Amino acid sequence: MIENVSPKKFLGQHFLIDENISKKIVNSISLKEFDKIIEIGPGKGALTKYLFEFSDKLILIEYDTESVEFIKSSYKKHNPNIIKQDFLKYNLKDILSQTSKNLILGNFPYNISSQIIFKILENYLLVGSLIGMFQKEVAERIISKPNSKEYGIISVRTQLLYDVKILFDVSPNVFFPKPRVNSSVISMTRKKNININFDLKLFDRLVKLSFQQRRKKIKNSLKKLDIKENILEDSIFGLRPEQLSVNDFIRLTQKISNETI
């Protein structure tokens, strides 16, 4: 039986050690509403221990061998359903379906937290909700609005598909080892009746190209696309990317795709 797990720097592990914070995260959403609950990176089970009431719908995904063995041995009576995989490489279609209400939650490793978000966005039809701990700076970028310095690619792409908000902030003192940054717990709830009536791949490309040169006007950032001159006459191309809302980026996508004013 593995009695302890050493936090591994290369995995970005900071174990949550405050029971009150663990309970607050778990209690921030009604778990009984979901068909599947996926915890990413359970580590030593700080959140997991409060999820076993729903063990029939709980699936744990953990990459660290030591953590997997710890969970299996420490919570043996619950017979945890734990998958030893790198979440970023795992095919969520193997465990989730579009017809189910699915939740992802976790105290996410800070070194891959943005990648986790983009993975979920790629699988938005499978993931209805998320509750997660992020570095505060990343959380603020996710929820930020136009005309702010935090507003960027992750803001636009996330808010296209999800309603997002910060639930509460968390001190470094509740982790071992202590991170050098503050943290925030955020919630993401997939928007109802999402109508993707535009080219989503083009949308993502436009957002990425625009914010790669965020100080430039849109028309200069998008030169690679060889957009027709009559399209560029629209006033939207005279704006900088942080001035565009999600709906503006949708309109931009439709305009370029249809090649109409």
Image: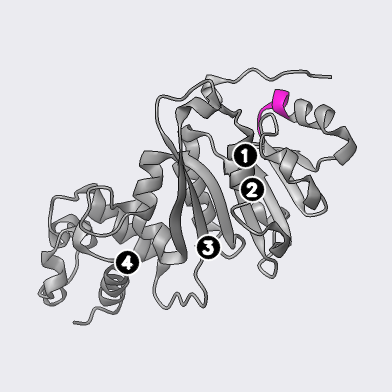
Q: Position of residue 33 (x, y in %)?
A: 70, 64
- Look at mark 3 in the image and give the residue it sits on: 189
- Left or right of 214 in this view: 23: right
Q: Quadrant of residue 11?
A: top right
First to last magenta residue range: 63-67
Q: Position of residue 111 (x, y in %)?
A: 46, 32
- Look at mark 4 in the image and give the residue it sits on: 246
| Mark closest to the chain's N terminus, 3 or 2 | 2
Residue with the most extreme front position? 20
> How far is mark 4 from mark 3, CA to CA?
16 Å
| Mark closest to the chain's N terminus, 4 or 1 | 1
- The kind of residue on which mark 1 rests is Ser
In this view of the protein, which residue sits in the foreground, 32 or 84? 32
- The kind of residue on which mark 3 rests is Thr
| Mark closest to the chain's N terminus, 3 or 1 | 1
Q: Secondary structure at mark 1?
A: helix
Q: Position of residue 44 (x, y in %)?
A: 69, 29
- Look at mark 1 in the image and give the residue it sits on: 22
